[in-house]
Structures are given as structure tokens and as C-alpha cells.
Amino acid sequence: MPKGNPRGIRSLRDLTRPGLRVAIANPEGVCVGAYAAEIIERQFTPEEKAAFRRNLVNYTESCEKTAMAISLNMADAVIGWRVFEHWDPDRIETVPLAPAQVSRIGYIPIAISRFSTDRAAAQRFIDFLTGPEGRAIFARHRYFSAVEDAAAWLGAENRWAASMRFPRNGSESSE
């Protein structure tokens, strides 16, 4: 939401209050929008879903445009990544969801393309990103580099790690 939280939003259910302008990324093409839709579906009653839909003013086309909806005062709140506030710290503030409302922790997978012409260089890049130096860079830019980091920020036990399956090759699902 906008810096200073002028509408006093403190919880997910506050997004159903009449007169709020809410935006989420398009759930059909943007992962953070799909996560938002999943949260709404799991957490809201049918009446709350209807109230939320009345407040929904935009389906954005990307993560960046979701954050921009706040920066440009096009919405009073978005359901997005906590890192949005670090993209525009003068205009965006995060109010985290209650840990029980977070149904999954999103991640960005990395892999070597089967079309790679230099598999060794690709593997070195993966090793760099997942090693101490790469993780430090992610942390400096306020991204989590491990499920445990996200759980610690939420103030929740690591209930996700046991159920998460990460793909090992191109034939496995990411869930």
C-alpha cells in the first residue's frame, strides 16, 4: 500500500472494506496474481469474495505493473511480493499477511536449457547464484534465497519445506 498506509489496512480482510481500490496481477499470466487468487479463494467467505471483487480496480500485466499501481496512486492496496516496497521505498509499504494465510512460498527456478551450447558455463552461473556470493546479492536487494528466510520473515515455522518439491530436470513439475 502507499507509504504511511493512509487507508489503515492491517489485514487481508481489510481489502473487502467498501471504497478501497485494490489491484492484483492477472492470475492467468502472472504468478503473483495466481497466488493472490489462491489466497482470496482459500481465505474469504463467498460474501467477502464478492466485496473484494467490488474493490478490484485492475488486473495488472506483471509484477512491476502491480507495484506501479501503488506508486502511481492507481490503487490503495495490492496483493504482491514484499519486495515491492524496496523497489520504491518512498511510495510503497508492506503489510504482511498473517502466516496462516500464506499458502505457499513462490520461487523462481533456474535450470540449464537443453539448447545450451556451454553447459559448463551455465552450471558455473547456477553455482554462483546459489552460492554464498549470489545469495548475498539477493539478500542485499531484499529477496529471500531460501524457504527458511521467508518463514523467518513471516514469523512462522517452516511448514513449507517438507511439502515443497523442486524440479530436478525439465520433466518434473515445480509443485
Image: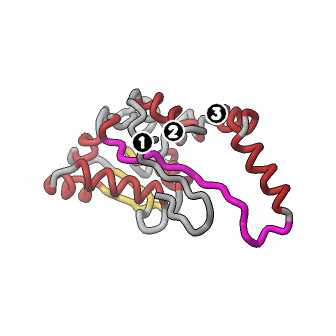
Badge 1 vs badge 2, beta-carbon distance below 8 Å: yes
* 106 sits left or right of 79 in the view: right
Q: What residue did someone put label 3 on?
A: 139
User: What percent of the width, then of the height, locates residue 67?
Assistant: 51, 48
Q: Which residue is mark 1?
A: 160
Label 3 Cα crowd, 10 Å radius (few <14 / some 14-19 / many 20+):
few
Q: Nearer the viewer, residue 64 or 174?
A: 174
Residue at position x 39%, y 34% in the image: 95
Q: Which residue is mark 2?
A: 147
> Residue at 49% across / 52% down in the picture?
165
In the image, the segment drawn in magenta is 101-117
- Residue 32 in the image: state x and y as whole percent: 46, 54
Occupied quadrant, residue 101? top left
Most prominent secondary structure in the magenta stretch? loop
Q: Nearer the viewer, residue 40 or 166?
A: 166
Q: Residue furthest left?
A: 47
Q: How many marks?
A: 3
Mark with earlier residue (1, 2) = 2
Give the residue type that dot 1 points to.
Trp
> Sequence order check: which comes first, mark 1 or mark 3?
3
Which comes before the other along the chain, label 3 or label 2? 3
Kind of residue at disc 3 = Ala
Q: Secondary structure at mark 3?
A: helix
Residue in the picture at 54% in, 49% down: 107
What colour scheme has been applied to the protein in the rendered image?
secondary structure
Quadrant of the frame with the N terminus:
top left
Question: Which residue is at a point 78% across and 53% down the rendered structure image?
Answer: 123
Q: Is residue 30 rendered to the left or right of residue 50?
A: right
Distance Cα–Cα, label 3 vs label 2: 13 Å
Task: Please say if 139 is above or below 71.
Answer: above
